[in-house]
Image: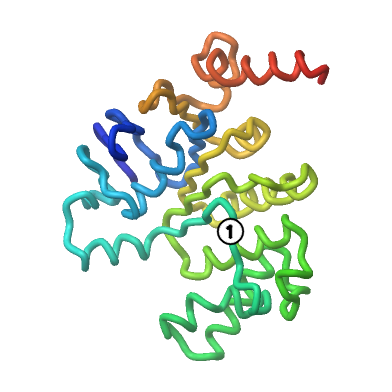
Amino acid sequence: MIDVKDLHVSFNDNHVLKGLTTLIEEQQATVIIGRSGIGKSVFLRSLCGLITPQKGTILIDEEDITNCSRKKMLKIRNKIGMLFQEGALFDSLTVYDNVAFPLTYHKLMDRAAIDKKVRKYLELVEMQNFLEAMPSELSGGMKRKVAIARTMILEPKYLFYDEPTSGLDPYSAAIVEIMIKKLQEELNITSLIVTHDIDLTNFIGDSIALLEDGFIIEKTSKVEAFKKNSLIYEHFIKKRERIQQVNGY
């Protein structure tokens, strides 16, 4: 479980997170939504220990990562898989070698064991027929699926996605959405997804939290979030509907 209390993150005079408090339940998909530039990615990077907050606590399995040794931090990071916004692959490596990279780099197992594991996760994301393909030969959605397999290869307890459908065409985005949901259901892991994509939110989320003005102003179930009396509907979904109406959708 991840328990965040009174989290403050600032960059010079820009106060991004202003006392954020939330609980990420285990074996669920929690979606953090909010406008672009509101601090969703900053929050995610804080949970990974990539950004040090000025104040607050982040308890991951009861260990406070804001106040722990480097050795403990490395141990906690091994529990976390992070899919960054672009999910960049190594252009010079094949699909197989991209996915194998975390294992070969850290020298965690022998070649036969690595081969078995790489094939397992490529099959899980339905990319087993593209082992020798280069990233330049793949569509945006396929690249993102390979990036997910690479993130999963170390078998993290927690999987964080930073705008996983950003920059993808609707078809590729749908493929990635289906893949994330499949992984969640089959592996029963704890997923945290930050996005401003309502379709992704509705398809994947068990619980939904709205980040606004540096705080989580509402966190509720998907069913409750899409009701017209919820803050999430008023602050986020309703605005999107208005924009669509103005643009004739």
Q: Position of residue 72 (x, y in %)?
A: 22, 63
Residue 241's place in the image compared with 45, above or below, is above
Residue under the image location 41 percent in, 80 percent down = 106
Residue 45's place in the image compared with 154, above or below, is above
Q: Position of residue 11 (x, y in %)?
A: 31, 40
- Assign a secondary structure to mark 1: loop
Image quarter hosting the C terminus: top right
At label 1, the amino acid type is: Gly
Q: Position of residue 169 (x, y in %)?
A: 77, 45
Residue 104's place in the image compared with 200, above or below, is below
In this figure, which residue is indicated by the disc labeled 1?
87
Badge 1: how crowded within 10 Å, few (<14), some, or many (20+)? Answer: many
Q: Residue furthest bottom?
A: 111
Q: Residue furthest front?
A: 12
Residue under the image location 60 percent in, 72 percent down = 90
The residue lying toward the viewer, choosing from 132 and 114, is: 132
Can residue 9 be seen?
A: no
Residue under the image location 59 percent in, 82 percent down = 116
The residue lying toward the viewer, choosing from 183 and 139, is: 139
